[in-house]
Image (spheres, rainbow, N blue to C red):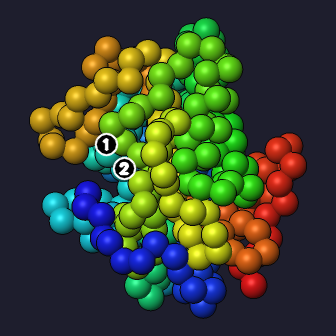
Amino acid sequence: MGLRKPGIYKSRDEMRLMVRPGVLTASSLDAVEAALRPGVTTGELDVVAETAIREGGGIPNFMLVPGYRNTICSSVNDEVVHGIPGARILRPGDIVSIDSGAEVAGWNGDSARTFVLDDPDRPELVAERRRLNDVTEQALWHGIAALAGARRLDEVGGAIEDYVEAQGAFGIIEDYTGHGIGRSMHEDPPVFNYRVSGRSPVVKPGLVVAIEPMITLGTIDTVTGSDDWTVATTDASDASHWEHSVAVHDDGIWVLTAHDGGAAGLAALGVRPVPVP
């Protein structure tokens, strides 16, 4: 997916226009979560997400990416990102990442959540996958919290890396990163999930980025499948993916793709989000 290269900082009015697609993206993931269960197909979940976005007055922005025809990406077990929804039936114990996005009036939202289906016959597997998922979600919130006080954008990746490494033996995917977001779903600048050298963009009002750690139980090496989209780990280890679009403005930060602006996720980290004024 190519990056559009406008200026990376938005005006206050432009950030206000990004609130609605962010909320609609969150609503599409809420709808998927409500429908998620063993026996449902990923294609059925795709219809659920599309319906939620269109009924809310938006356009599924993944469909606007050349060559992609679906509303969500559904990545299961060892699939990291970009899984294509279809006839696959979800099974008890599966770990399922759902990535969704909405466009409203030319502005974009992008978010991902991962879920672990219960399996009473394999409690150890479920516990392991839930642990991976919890670490990945918290890595996202640590990255967002770092953004709130950062001087430069690379501090986000440093915070994610520090948190993940402190949790044990997990792999941080390096082949795929977060990104800027605005008129295009994928814009500059890249948002790394690990510490990088060199000067990164200044964090100042108008910066809007999608932060999205992808964490595995094994290797960080990936391979793209024969469909030219689905990215999986080379050692078949499980993966989790969480993502939020976040706006930086004069009074603080606001998580555009969370109904509460990120208040619940950031509370334990001492950050209070403030709505875009």
Q: Is residue 103 above or below residue 225?
A: below
Give x and y (percent) for residue 261.
73, 65
Residue denoted by label 2: 73
- Mark 1 touching mark 2, by CB under 8 A? yes
* Helix, strand or loop for disc 2: strand
The answer, for residue 54, to whether it is visible in the render is: no
Binning the other alpha carbons within 10 Å of mark 2 as few (below 14), some (14 to 19) or many (20 upward) gives many
| Residue shown at the point (52%, 76%) measured from the top left | 9
Left or right side of 194 for 74: left
Can you give x and y, in whole percent of width and height, for residue 203 in the image? 61, 63
Residue 221 image position (x, y, % from top left): 31, 23
For marks 1 and 2 on the same chain, the one whose residue lies earlier in the sequence: 2
In this view, the residue in front, 264 or 154, is: 154
Above or below: residue 76 compared with residue 206:
above
Residue at the image point whose x is 60% and y is 46% from the top: 156
Residue at which label 1 appears: 83
Q: What's the amino acid at mark 2? A: Cys
Question: Which quadrant would the N terminus be assigned to in this image?
Answer: bottom left
Q: Secondary structure at mark 1?
A: loop
Specify the amino acid type for callout 1: Gly
Give the quarter of the image for residue 189.
bottom left
Q: CA distance from mark 1 to mark 2?
A: 5 Å
What number is the disc on residue 244?
A: none
For image coordinates 32% across by 14% down, the residue present is: 235
Q: Nearer the viewer, residue 99 or 182?
A: 182
Q: Nearer the viewer, residue 208 or 235?
A: 208
